[in-house]
Image (cartoon, coloured by chain):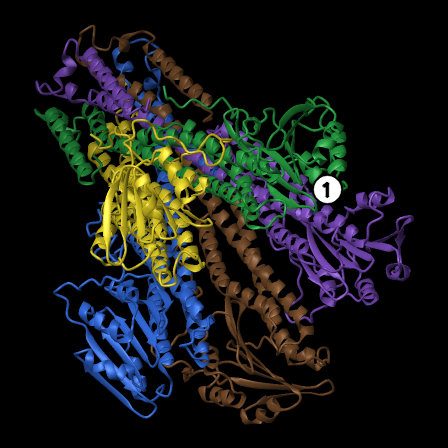
Chain colours: A blue, B yellow, C green, D purple, E brown
Amino acid sequence: MLHLQPLTQPPADTMEIFDKQYHAPGTPPGTLAEPPPATAPATLRLVEFSETEYTEREVVELAECAACLKGDTVSWLHIQGRAQTDMLRELGALLGLHPLALEDVVNIGQRPKFEEYEDQLFVVLSQPIFREGLATTEQVSLFLGEGYVVSFHHGADDPFAPVRRRLQNHTIRGRGADYVFYTLLDMVVDQGFPVLEGLSERLEAMETELLERLDTSTRQILQGIHEVKRELLLLRRVLWPQRDLLSQLSRETVPLIGAEVRPYLRDCHDHATQIVDLVETYREMSTTMLEVYLTGVSNRLNESMRFLTIIATLFIPLTFIVGVYGMNFGGASDSPWAMPELKWHYGYPLVWLAMIAVAIAMLLFFRRRRWL
Amino acid sequence: MLHLQPLTQPPADTMEIFDKQYHAPGTPPGTLAEPPPATAPATLRLVEFSETEYTEREVVELAECAACLKGDTVSWLHIQGRAQTDMLRELGALLGLHPLALEDVVNIGQRPKFEEYEDQLFVVLSQPIFREGLATTEQVSLFLGEGYVVSFHHGADDPFAPVRRRLQNHTIRGRGADYVFYTLLDMVVDQGFPVLEGLSERLEAMETELLERLDTSTRQILQGIHEVKRELLLLRRVLWPQRDLLSQLSRETVPLIGAEVRPYLRDCHDHATQIVDLVETYREMSTTMLEVYLTGVSNRLNESMRFLTIIATLFIPLTFIVGVYGMNFGGASDSPWAMPELKWHYGYPLVWLAMIAVAIAMLLFFRRRRWL
Amino acid sequence: MLHLQPLTQPPADTMEIFDKQYHAPGTPPGTLAEPPPATAPATLRLVEFSETEYTEREVVELAECAACLKGDTVSWLHIQGRAQTDMLRELGALLGLHPLALEDVVNIGQRPKFEEYEDQLFVVLSQPIFREGLATTEQVSLFLGEGYVVSFHHGADDPFAPVRRRLQNHTIRGRGADYVFYTLLDMVVDQGFPVLEGLSERLEAMETELLERLDTSTRQILQGIHEVKRELLLLRRVLWPQRDLLSQLSRETVPLIGAEVRPYLRDCHDHATQIVDLVETYREMSTTMLEVYLTGVSNRLNESMRFLTIIATLFIPLTFIVGVYGMNFGGASDSPWAMPELKWHYGYPLVWLAMIAVAIAMLLFFRRRRWL
Amino acid sequence: MLHLQPLTQPPADTMEIFDKQYHAPGTPPGTLAEPPPATAPATLRLVEFSETEYTEREVVELAECAACLKGDTVSWLHIQGRAQTDMLRELGALLGLHPLALEDVVNIGQRPKFEEYEDQLFVVLSQPIFREGLATTEQVSLFLGEGYVVSFHHGADDPFAPVRRRLQNHTIRGRGADYVFYTLLDMVVDQGFPVLEGLSERLEAMETELLERLDTSTRQILQGIHEVKRELLLLRRVLWPQRDLLSQLSRETVPLIGAEVRPYLRDCHDHATQIVDLVETYREMSTTMLEVYLTGVSNRLNESMRFLTIIATLFIPLTFIVGVYGMNFGGASDSPWAMPELKWHYGYPLVWLAMIAVAIAMLLFFRRRRWL
Amino acid sequence: MLHLQPLTQPPADTMEIFDKQYHAPGTPPGTLAEPPPATAPATLRLVEFSETEYTEREVVELAECAACLKGDTVSWLHIQGRAQTDMLRELGALLGLHPLALEDVVNIGQRPKFEEYEDQLFVVLSQPIFREGLATTEQVSLFLGEGYVVSFHHGADDPFAPVRRRLQNHTIRGRGADYVFYTLLDMVVDQGFPVLEGLSERLEAMETELLERLDTSTRQILQGIHEVKRELLLLRRVLWPQRDLLSQLSRETVPLIGAEVRPYLRDCHDHATQIVDLVETYREMSTTMLEVYLTGVSNRLNESMRFLTIIATLFIPLTFIVGVYGMNFGGASDSPWAMPELKWHYGYPLVWLAMIAVAIAMLLFFRRRRWL
């Protein structure tokens, strides 16, 4: 039986191609959407440090942080999960955050961007991540103010634990809020490397299979290439503006970011550029692979066709010849014109000879055309 | 019967690809075309507000608005539907509008653009909308002057009702005309989100069907992809310049727009950019889907071909063999060369054995080539 | 008979793809080529006007214009048709025109460009036009000086009659030479709208036919698409630089062009941009249509193939079976092995049953693979 | 016999795709490669002129030129062919040429560029030329200094003879070295027009043949398109930077080039731009032609296929029917079930009627599907 | 037998498409990874020179260099192979190198870039190289400081031996550290020429084979084209930023680089641009070749198809005719309707005449369609 059973399993849980949350047009700007009721409340983790001290605690009421965020030490408030509207409004009032920025924090699916307000720098980033085996992104929002950083991450897992560990271990504690801000940027950007490494492995596996078995490559590979292209397309949509954002941040003179942090931001921009380069390179590769796949399909068609042509053109004339001597003229009439060949002494072997001659002529013709 | 009936229904009411209204070349600039006589007259709705008051009324004679537009309060005149030439001329004289701008209001199908005149800012926008299930756009024209906004919308439905509700509810009443202007811009731009969400749903539905039923996807999908591509192409033609327009507006220092409205315009530009990104992403997706469709067609051809090749090459040699023993040499001559096989005791079973051997050899050959 | 007769009529009178007139390399710059002797002499039409007066007359000798071009009134000299070298040289001497500019006037097929000389502004434009049903362009050259405009048009028909009518009707008479200059620019640019509308109609007609009759679309459509693509390609080559030229003209401060004419040039630039957008959109559309055409061809191939496969695989095994019982073993030998089936009482009906069973099995197989 | 003989003649003498001469990496910059010993020595031709005088002579020893190049008159030294290293070094010392520039003169295959040294302007150009029927380029190098021009051309034929004729005929003698420099630039650039005209003729000839004989176009056309694409690709690689070079030269203020020569350089830049436009247009055309060719191939496949399908599906069932009545059940058994049709009075005509009915049904089916 | 055996050898040792070494996200910036224990230790070679002296020695302890690097002479330290972390840290402390720069030295697979620190210029380059017959790149890192250059190369072979030879031979000894720095840049960039020449040879060999044997080109060529495309894609990813880097270096005023070295850097930038041009040209060529390959495949399919169609449609009707006269109506019944043709005197020759007539008609039809 042929192997080509219909593909019964649809591509299960692909990334949404429309991942933007937006208000109905006409809603006042700065409106904050309430999270769905079933959502687990966000957890707040406050880190406060100076060169000599380090405290970290989970916060329940935002009021606990007020003194700290306004104080002399450097403080970093991380909000993990979907924040409640009330809490956001309270935070906005406390630190003087712009309502449009808070709206962008809540309406995930934003394009990476940075906005400079009077007292804060606001940055929206896209952190690449593998979810259920598919490359996708999660939104991270950061506020940098005088002496504080506020970070938001909507996913289930807190990606910033290593940064807290480094603060605890004193490595970067002497630095200011701008360095913490850079560290968080850097973490988000660098998540692109393992994600792209994963994609490159899928691409290379498919390429090897494609070239090794050019004539039998199944449509599973076609679907695989299509999926990788799709993931790259969606990654690219957020990673390009992320690169531009970092380019701007590292070139412009933002008062909240010290001169000694600038080279680090340039390094971060460099990583973002490398990631974009990889995404573009992989996109071209997947396009080339699709072409190779299609060529493989054409090649196979060609082969079947040639094989059929050879067999058919070899036997069709022979079948005609044997058909001729299957006609019943001989038996029914005594006319000397009635298939005298049938009565020849060597009639039968002569027919065989004729057929063999025809077959050899055909084969020679095929060979001359290099079909054999 | 084969499923492939000819497509009897032509694509019904697609968007016009030439949607520009223009005067015959050589017509003086600023000429205002009269609307066709059957057109319902435009309705004028005047909103006047200050921080404490709010009045809204439908206006029949433009003269009613004169005092109000020139007065101290902020006033917003919305003209819904196709405006009469006389009324436009009167309005132009009242507010000192440039004749070229008025011409652009009337000749719909303009490219989004903004023009700064001495006393006014003139903006032409394209509002994305679904009409009869197809994504298209409608022209919105806005004038911003000292203390007034004049807006024009040519469609049947007034999209700006929510803005009036917000003004009534005091939400934004303290702001000036520039904020009302921004609010209208924002409404028009944000209409892109539901339209693109609709397109993304069509794309995803087609993609799922395409990948699930790669071998049987009908040409309805081809037509569907073609339609989405076409709609995206036409949307893109107006959304790109709309994005550029907002970028300019949010960067340049326009005296009529206050500094505190600038961040809102940047937010609006950001939305326009996201919309353009989505349009581009969906265009690439539909291109990829076309490729997958074509590959599916090739695959099916390949399969039919292989199946035919297998059946034909299996039976053609066998049919030749049985043809040989259908020749009438045996009956007509007594020559010992005249098909002696026919007279052999085991002639018939031997022929069957020979045929089975040929068939098995063929099947083995097919298996070695992985055609089975 | 098959419908597909060979295309006997070649594409008749397509636009030349190399339409540039050039001197042999090494010819001194500013050399003016003499028109071919058979060319009808150019006609000169001089318009002279002030706010109160308007005179228009045909000029035979250039000397007649000298006083007028140098005088206080605004004068506009239009030269229709191929100008004689002597006349051009005389004109050049009279107004101090740069020899390179005059060379560009004569060597038609120039790229749209503008050049600012000391006393003049020189502009070369491409006017889109339908000639024998094909979209092409004609060169228009304009000189703007202090108080005069000189225009050249090489075609047979004078496109500027409407402008003269407007001058006569006093509409624009109060303006200066710069406004006349703008009016001519605007006329040339706006000729693009009817030409593109014509192309859009051809495109839409082909698209409708393509989608309605996907399975029978003939190669006339292929040729039609190819022709539209070709015309768009050639239009695009001249319309892009024309847009850039107008962008520069409307942005740069050219002393000869007054500030109040600037908004009109911006409007003209806007039209040129719309025209370029349309050209690009139509090019993408024709590319998409070519893909759809090719997909239609593939689909049809697929269908023929499937039909052939079904018929052939249905009957080839049956033909083999009847071939078996056409063998002559039965009659020639008395061996019990010699086709005993032939002597069975129900042999013949049994063979029919077997054949029907094989046919049903095949049909079920086809249905399972969704080929039916 | 089929027409499609294998292509025996390989594409003879195509342009090298790697045409750059380079030193082994690590060679000191400014190293001058010795020409191969068999090369004919370069010929030096010195032109010296002022408004009143003109002398031209062939030079054997470079020392002869020293006085002249340093003198008050304008002098132009043209070196035709591959220059000896010693002579170049001597020239470099005499005029103070930068060793890197001399290296670029010798290592032909340079990218067009210009370099401004302290006392000279150095320009490398690519002159388009037809060599053995193929469009290619030759390197021309120019030095412009105070009162002198030095030009190098590596080919066999001196392209600058017309310039010398014009100098002799007094046409441009009053101008300085910068004008001579421009004249040489202009000659080199304008060689692009005849070359592109030649390519356009080949393209148009192929297009006509392609559209006239869509069904029989041979692969000679495929090879022709491929060759034109290849030549255009290689031309484009050098003509783009040449255009940029001229754009820079005509915009920047180079002290060695007088203001009155600037418009001429702009004209030259304009020609270079037109040439680049033509190259791009022809590249798109050749791409479109390849698509049309491929579509023609698909169309022909389709037709063969349809024809085969019609013939095969018409006769396969009929052949089955006649096969049925070729079975030998009737003769061997007396059973009333043994093919009673054979004994019917009208058996034979009935079979014919059945076959005609089947054939008509098939033909109607084909017509309904518009295959006929 | 058919030639098309399945491709048994997979593409052996292709370049990794993900070649970036990176730390786990969250690692502190400036972390230096230890080389794998089995790695051979890096060798340090110190060159110290002034106009009169030259010493070169292998260094074991970094401390040996301290005096020299800080001294008055120009010194160049080259580190070949993977450097130990301790040594790097020591070097960093000695010269005040930025930790981010040192991290980039260790984490190979960096994008070419340059970074200007307070006292140093840091450059990362990609040196093209052939490894096992495949074009790939190796990272070279350079520090330029006041009076010293430090270079790192990770490969097995030291590419800078020629530079040392030139220093020894006095050629460039009078120059400063900036010239040495340029010399190293130049060496790295110029390695692109032999690599691209190699690729061009592979491309030309494939093109010749493709065009000569359009009908029999095997899939080895397909794989060859795919490999070249892939290598070019990966080369391009690093050569583009390398070109930009050199463009910046040659334009910006970097205090560490003297004005007299600037023209050399421009020359180096020019080479980098030529290399990028070649890469782009070759990419387009390989794309065109893929199209030609595909067209060849289509052509061959077409030919097989046509051949099959001709043979099949010629013999299928004839086989039907002979099948008719193989029916057994004649023998079994005495009805005058029972195949009277069989009893005609000239029945058999008449059938032959009919068959010959059908065959000639078919052949004429084929000729009219130009299939023969």
Residue placed at 73% from the left, 65% from the top? D117
Q: Is residue B291 visible?
A: no
Given residues B154 and A277, the one toward you in this image is: B154
Taking C289 as reference, is D176 above or below it? Answer: below
Q: Quadrant of residue A204?
A: bottom left
> Quick one: A344 or D100, which is closer to the camera?
D100
Q: For the residue marked with disc 1, what is the amino acid?
A: His
Residue at 67% in and 68% down: E263
In the image, taking residue B284 as reference, residue C367 lies left or right, namely left
Residue B321 locus on image (x, y percent):
28, 31
Residue A186 in the image, given as x and y percentages of width and height: 37, 74
The answer to which of E335 and D37 lies nearer the viewer is: D37
Corner quadrant of residue B97:
top left
Quarter holding the C terminus of chain C is: top left
Residue shown at the point (91%, 59%) measured from the top left: D64
Q: Which residue is mark 1?
A: C98
Q: Position of residue D142 (x, y in %)?
A: 75, 56
The mark total stands at 1
For the N terminus of chain C, which image quadrant? top left
Q: Position of residue D307 (x, y in %)?
A: 35, 26
Q: D184 left or right of B3?
A: right
Front-lying residue, B261 or A268: B261
Please give the name of the residue rendered at 34% of the width and 87% of the height, measured from the top-left corner.
A173
Q: Which class describes the residues within 10 Å of circle 1: few (<14), some (14-19), or many (20+)?
A: some
* Above or below: residue D59 compared with residue E170: above
Above/below status of B64 relative to B242: above
Question: In which chain is the residue bearing label 1?
Answer: C
Q: Is residue E69 left or right of residue E210?
A: right
SS at mark 1 in the image: loop
